[in-house]
Amino acid sequence: MSYGAAPALQQAVFQRLTGFPALAAVAIHDAVPPTATGTFVLIGPEEARDQSDKSGAGAEHQLVISVITDATGFLSIKTIAADISDALIGAPLALTRGLLVNLLFLRASARRIEEGETRRIDLTFRARVQL
């Protein structure tokens, strides 16, 4: 197993999201911004597991992409979450290292945080990468 494709996968996801027209007005980060107000997307935690077999080395990456807002209601961030899903599912992401075999949606979780003042949706995707 190798974690070697992880940076390339994150770069490709970031490029896809920042270039997707429906997300043009949304800030996309890989760390919580210093002034975490408004609405933003956070490319966050990831887990990787070995998926090597006799055909070669590979890994399964489960990555979480979050939509966070201090706006009232969930509708606006549900729309953004749907746009993220549309942007990634079936997208031909070109990695600088490795080959993306597939990228699938696994689950989403919507909740209030910080005493209900902030809303967050965590989208989990599974990426299979061949090295």
Image: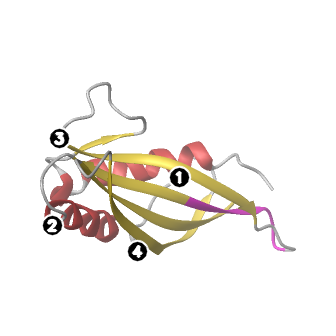
Q: Earlier in the sequence, mark 2 or mark 3?
A: 3
Residue furthest top as drawn:
34
* Residue appearing at x 81%, y 56% in the figure: 1
Nearer mark to the viewer, of 3 and 1: 3
Which residue is the site of mark 2? Answer: 75
Nearer to the camera, 119 or 59: 119
The percent position of residue 22, horizontal first and vertical second, equals 16, 60
* Residue appearing at x 34%, y 62% in the figure: 111
Q: Earlier in the sequence, mark 3 or mark 1?
A: 3
| Cβ atoms at labels 3 and 4 below 8 Å apart | no
* Residue 90 - label: 4
* Residue appearing at x 26%, y 52% in the figure: 116
Magenta stretch prevailing secondary structure: strand
Question: Which contiguous range is marked in magenta?
Answer: 55-62
The percent position of residue 40, horizontal first and vertical second, equals 25, 45
Nearer mark to the viewer, of 3 and 4: 3
Which residue is the site of mark 3? Answer: 38
- Residue 126 falls in image quadrant: bottom right
Left or right: where 94 falls relative to 34? right
Left or right: where 76 falls relative to 97? left
Q: Quadrant of the C terminus?
A: bottom right
Nearer mark to the viewer, of 4 and 2: 2
User: In the rendered view, would you say 50 is above or below 90?
Assistant: above
Q: What is the CA distance from the residue labelled 1 to the residue labelled 2?
A: 33 Å
Which residue is the site of mark 1? Answer: 95
Task: Residue 60: say if magenta.
Answer: yes
Three-letter code, disc 3: Gly
Neighbourhood count class around disc 2 (C-alpha, 10 Å): few under 14, some 14–19, many 20 upward: few
Three-letter code, disc 4: Gly
Q: What is the CA distance from the residue labelled 3 to the residue labelled 1?
A: 31 Å
Let me know if residue 88 appears in the view. no
Q: Secondary structure at mark 3?
A: loop
